[in-house]
Image (cartoon, rainbow, N blue to C red):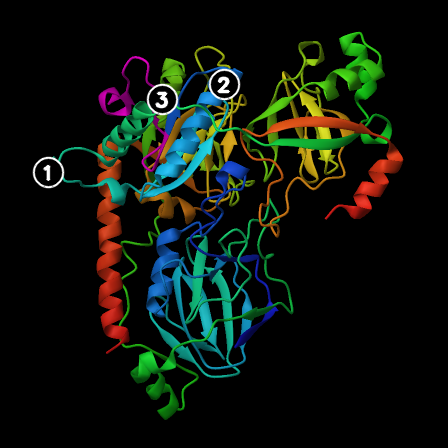
Amino acid sequence: MPGSQQYTDSNAPSLEALGDSALIVRFGDRLDARINAQVHRAAALLAAANLAGVREIVPAYASLTVHYDPAFFSHDDSAQIDVSPFARIGERLLVLLHDSRDEILQTTRLIEIPVCYGAEFGPDLADVAAHAGLSEAEVVALHSTSTYRVAMLGFAPGFPYLFGLNESLHLPRRATPRTRVPAGSVAIGGQQTGIYPGELPGGWHLIGRTPLHLFDAARASPALLAPADEVRFIAIDADEFAHLQTSAT
Amino acid sequence: MSIEVLKPGLLSTLQDGGRHGSQHLGVGCAGAMDANALRLANYLVGNQANAVALEITLQGPRLRFETPALIALTGANIEASVDQSPVPLWRPIVLRAGSELVLGGMHSGARSYLAVAGGFDVASVLGSGSADINAALGSRSLQVGTRLDCKPQHRDRYQRLWSTLDAGAEKYRAASWWIDPAPWFDADPNIVVHTLRGAHFAQLDIESQRAFFAYEFRIGSESNRVGYRLQGPNLQLAAPLELISEGLSIGTVQLPPSGNAIVLMAEHPTTGGYPRIGHVASADLAKLAQARPGQTLRFVEIDLTEAQKSYLAQQMEIERLRLAIADRLHD
């Protein structure tokens, strides 16, 4: 039944049912900072609209997922009884997004993340350097001079997928994933860099570690980073890592 | 009031309606696998729909109640007794102080729900009392010696039930009425779930498209609250597909390169990048939640309009029951 599952007009994002109680608003299908900025603008806008019946708004790289309760969209004032909840919420979302597509993304936060690179903190730093044809110091310099953008959080609570990795540091994931990656590990996977919030399995290359806690459910803001935040890595040495680790809350 | 865990059972966790509103932080919903059984258990003891209850998997725990309690059991047909007296399911029951509730195996189904009037009192993490085992959020699964606290119960509200207990000499008192489990629990081991085509269904090769709705799948032994791993016809895409991570939903059927599909359940990750070939209709999620590893499963195609209609009809039926139960409880 393709007719009821796709709503498109030129210039607008496309809508796609994700089962009967969620839908995906799609802005593109590739890793692209400009598209991702659109996603976060739309996510902020829909969150601000605070639609009854919307359970969650989950931004990803090039799309955002809206989880909704079909019961809230089963009827409206138009007296059209044959319009499905998916069609009703879809129409409302597209109108909201269309009316405000020229608004610019609100200024985001810049978060600095101290990282101790290499040695036992980043066991794959040498491999990454060898693959890139650089020295370890050059890899650290390249990684810690870029400004990154949190493209999305996913995989595990507080895990940030970051945009902005220097192209010379792009490399395929490890052939064999580790079963346990230490919490705080800063890693490279494909064109992305990210930080493991807790001890997790993982297939990315570990180049360093931060003493900061990326996720703590007991904090007022459990995740240190939010989608659309800007991030910069600050290289620190092992002494400072130890010092920050004891003072980190 | 408090309940002492004498035996934990196979996997018993506290669950509510789920942890909603934090998926943008990578925090999944968790929550009861069989959301209907959770709600009905709660209604039977006068709780809100999604109060925290105990989700019991396959083999039940043994619990000692320190104070009198109003309880209800729903979901799979679990063996239940108080001091050797069998306890009926799907109805309110008042237990005396010191009662030992012994929950055993299930004749069919996989998950039972134990609700206590007032609800279990557990620290709320990001707005939910649900245990998320993989993310280590919320409470842990029951262990020997775990004490479960309960919120205060409004005994005055159910005077009649309580007074019959006070007057009698029995181990417990069950209400004279119950909910018919038939629409909410299906003991048939051959599971049929209505399923929508997913965004990437059309990219399956022709034989796989046919096989998905034509053949039986077996629920693999590594299935759990995160997802059910299916064994059956090997499903393959006509051509490889490069996808970037996107949102996922409970009921999403993902296809990893192995060709063995996975149906995502309550504790699924928030995002993922495998092709999405189907979505189990919300109205059939409870049926799926009651499936055991080793059982077979068939997907029957449904369209979005029908899926939403059947979900709405189911919700209306639950609402109708809520009113009827409230009426009886306050009688």
Q: Residues within 10 Å of mark 2 (few under 14, many from 20)?
A: few
The residue sitting at 33% across, 54% down in the picture is: B185
Pointer 3 chain: A
Image coordinates for residue A102, horizontal then vertical, percent:
37, 20
Residue B245: image location, x then y, percent: 51, 25
Residue nearest the viewer, comparing A180 with A124: A124
Mark 1, residue position: A79
| Image mark for residue A101 | 3
* Residue type at numbered disc 2: Leu
Residue drawn at point x = 46 percent, y = 10 percent: B239
List x then y, in percent, for residue A217.
60, 49
The part of the chain drawn in magenta is A1-23
Q: Residues within 10 Å of mark 3 (few under 14, many from 20)?
A: some
Residue carrying label 2: B243
Q: Amino acid at mark 3?
A: Arg
Q: How far apart are the alpha carbons under marks 2 and 1?
A: 40 Å
The reply to whether discs 2 and 1 touch (Cβ–Cβ < 8 Å) is no
Q: Nearer the viewer, mark 3 or mark 1?
A: 3
Please determine whether, in this image, residue A113 is positioned above or below residue B238: below
Q: Secondary structure at mark 3?
A: loop
Instruction: Locate residue B164: give its quadrant.
Output: bottom left
Q: Is residue B269 visible?
A: no
Q: Is residue B169 left or right of residue B318?
A: right
Q: Is residue B197 visible?
A: yes
Label 3 vs label 1: CA separation?
Answer: 29 Å
- B223 sits left or right of B86 in the view: right
